């Protein structure tokens, strides 16, 4: 039986891969003929092509990107709302993990499309927190 695989781009070089309902984050860098892939603690290098267009894969959106939690954490504050314009480096969410505050910053200029978390919420690693257009 073939695995149910879905791939969605969530940022520049960042993909959310769902395999039979289990989600993982994969980081990709390089050119199409010289790719470096970091997945599950391992680095792969080679000529990797993303098989979009087979029906099981979502086409990556160039317009929308998400800020995700780097580790399991508690949302302390949400400092944006849908429609807000942000500049690169703007703190949009503050998380707390292992007794440390983690300010989550916008990776680029954009507009907040959706806020997917709320104050006091416990979020798992790789959970989308804020979507940008």
Image (cartoon, rainbow, N blue to C red):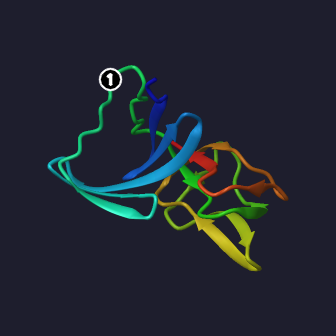
Choose top left, top right, bottom left or bottom right for residue 61.
top left
Q: Position of residue 47 (x, y in %)?
A: 17, 48
Q: 77 or 58, which lies in front?
A: 58
The outermost residue toward the left is 33
Element marked by disc 1? loop
Nearer to us in this view, 62 or 112? 62
Report the residue at 49% width, 52% height from top.
Answer: 25
Farthest-out residue, front: 1
Q: Is residue 62 left or right of residue 65?
A: left
| Count of all numbered marks drawn on residues in the image | 1
Q: Residue at x 46, y 58 (%)?
A: 40
Q: Position of residue 52 (x, y in %)?
A: 32, 29
How packed mark 1 is, by other alpha carbons closer than 10 Å (few <14, some 14-19, many 20 or more), is few
Q: Is residue 129 left or right of residue 75?
A: left
Which residue is painted at 34% across and 22% down in the image? 54
Residue 125 at x, y = what percent? Answer: 63, 58
Q: What is the residue that sits farthest to the right in this orientation?
A: 120
Residue at position x 48%, y 60% in the image: 107
Between 128 and 131, which is closer to the camera in this rendering? 128
Residue pointed to by mark 1: 53
How far across and down, in percent of the image, does residue 93 sit?
68, 62
Q: Is residue 73 above or below residue 35?
A: below
In the image, is 81 to the left or to the right of 107? right
Residue sitting at the far top? 55
């Amino acid at each position: 039986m073939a695995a149910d695989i879905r791939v969605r781009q969530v940022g520049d070089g960042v993909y959310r891969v769902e395999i039979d309902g289990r989600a993982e984050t994969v980081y990709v860098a390089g050119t199409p003929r010289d790719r470096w892939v970091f997945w599950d603690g391992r680095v792969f290098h080679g000529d990797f092509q993303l098989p979009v267009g087979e029906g099981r894969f979502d086409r990556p959106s160039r317009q929308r990107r998400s800020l995700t939690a780097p580790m399991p954490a508690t949302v302390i504050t949400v400092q944006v709302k849908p429609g807000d314009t942000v500049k690169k480096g703007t703190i949009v969410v503050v998380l707390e993990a292992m007794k440390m505050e983690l300010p989550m910053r916008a990776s680029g200029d954009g507009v907040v499309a959706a806020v997917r978390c709320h104050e006091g919420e416990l979020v798992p690693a790789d959970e989308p927190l804020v979507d940008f257009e």
